Amino acid sequence: MAWVILNVFLYLLAGYGAAALLMAIITSIRRRVCTENANVKLIVMVKNGEEVIEGIVRNIFLGDFLRKIMVCGKLTVLDMGSEDSTLEILKRLEKEYGDMEVLEKNQKNEVFTYFSKNNPLFPYDNM
């Protein structure tokens, strides 16, 4: 009886080890693809969208939309000078979601700077 329990325990440990090895391999592949596709970025531009922006952002993250289109997806939301509470809502959501970046209108050049740093042939260098 003790021999059966020991065998079951050993099989469980072997299964756990195999699962851990598989996860390590998958993580390694995702990191490699992530660095190869660094020039892919999802940007949402918004102005005066306080009534809908929270729902849009939450649907992007809850539906795992970013991971479906980009392996290491990060959402960048560019507020184009909203006069309502859109920016405050975005700042609150930025704290909640780690894969979100909020830029204000005066920071819009950072979007193009990101690409020109990663791709010297990017055509919008003078924007």
Image (spheres, rainbow, N blue to C red):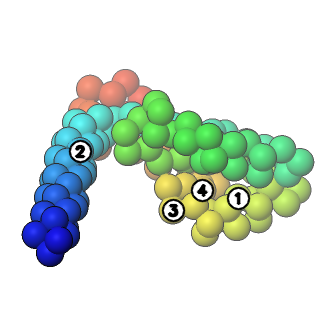
Q: Position of residue 77 (x, y in %)?
A: 61, 47
User: What residue would you read off at disc 1?
Assistant: 90
**Dot in front, 3 or 2:** 2
Which circle's residue, 4 or 2, is located before the other in the chain? 2
State the residue in front, 51 or 6.
6
Which circle's residue, 2 or 1, is located before the other in the chain? 2
**Dot in front, 2 or 1:** 2
Q: Position of residue 11 (x, y in %)?
A: 16, 58
Q: Is residue 30 left or right of residue 113?
A: left
- Asked whether disc 4 touches disc 1, contact meaning CB atoms under 8 Å apart, the reply is yes
Label 3 – label 4 distance at C-alpha: 11 Å
Give the amino acid at mark 4. Val
Q: Position of residue 40 (x, y in %)?
A: 39, 34
User: What residue would you read off at disc 3?
Assistant: 98
Label 1 – label 3 distance at C-alpha: 12 Å
Q: Residue at x 55, y 42 (%)?
A: 64
Number of numbered callouts drawn? 4
User: What residue would you read off at disc 2?
Assistant: 26
Q: Is residue 54 left or right of residue 103?
A: right
* Residue count near mark 3 (Cα–Cα under 10 Å), binned few <14, some 14–19, many ≥20: few
Give the amino acid at mark 3. Gly
User: What residue would you read off at disc 4?
Assistant: 102
- Asked whether disc 3 touches disc 4, contact meaning CB atoms under 8 Å apart, the reply is no
